[in-house]
Image: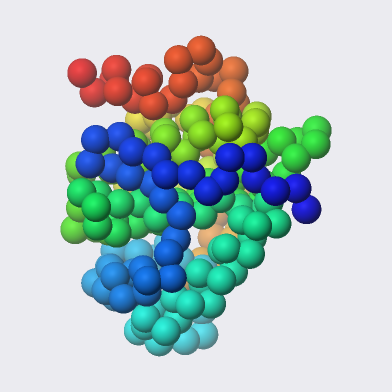
Amino acid sequence: MERLPGWPVVLAEGPVGLRPHRYRDAREWSEVRLANEKWLAPWEPTANRSWADRHSAGEYVPVYRSLKRGAREGQVMPFVITYEGRLAGQLTLGNIVRGAFCSTYAGYWVDGRLAGRGIMPTALAMAVDYGFTASGLHRVEVNIRPENTASRRVVEKLGFRQEGFHSRYLHIDGDWRDHVGYALTVEDVAPQGLLARWRASRV
């Protein structure tokens, strides 16, 4: 597998940061995940264990190792989102494919207690710009359940193009769920980049 150009990386825009996962994130990751069950569970892949069992500090270790291995193999760029230095969520550029496709899928979540502060659009804009520049990707896709209005607002604020409707696309929260497909290519944000466009839209 091809190693990721420029990885690992730390990015920041005001109080919002992106950085690789750390082994010592376990306790804070667990606290945030456990506190956000109602906020996050409806959008999570189906599992046969309880939320508490899946999000103990001990459960972070295999997650960390899997993400680190995926990054080492060039398949994923896994970021912790921070806000004012504290763990506030996760953002992953995953299923990275090179060659003629040169594309990735973005997935993300943010602590619901911090929602409404522009954290998620800022983090996604930084990750997209990094993917398009340092990592040489051409396309970023995001697939979201139609009912997930908060997540859809994130990509729509950033100007992602709605491209399709995927019937029964992923097994989420106990059933096969429809998803709406959004995408951006590097040409869509040239020459200034997505973060600069997001900054300008907030002024």
Q: Residue furthest top?
A: 191
Residue 123 versus residue 155: which sits nearer the camera? 123
In the image, residue 164 above or below residue 198: below
Q: Residue 134 occupies which quadrant of the picture?
A: top right
Residue drawn at x 33%, y 38% as measured from the top left: 12
Identified at 71% across, 36% down, the residue is 102
Q: Quadrant of the C terminus?
A: top left
Q: Could you say which is closer to the camera, residue 89 or residue 179?
A: 89
Q: x%, y% of residue 163?
A: 58, 33
Q: Nearer the viewer, residue 185 or 46?
A: 185
Residue 52 position within the rendered picture, expressed as x and y whole percent measured from the top left = 35, 84
Write the residue at 24% across / 57% down: 86
- Report whether residue 32 is seen: yes
Residue furthest right in the image: 100
Query: Percent x, y for residue 50?
Result: 41, 85
Classify residue 134 as left or right of residue 26: right
What x and y, as percent, mark residue 11? 39, 40
Position of residue 164 in the picture relative to residue 3 (left or right): left
- Do we see residue 183 in this rendering? no
How many marks can you see?
0
Viewer-side residue, 188 vs 199: 199
Q: Residue at x 61, y 56 (%)?
A: 71
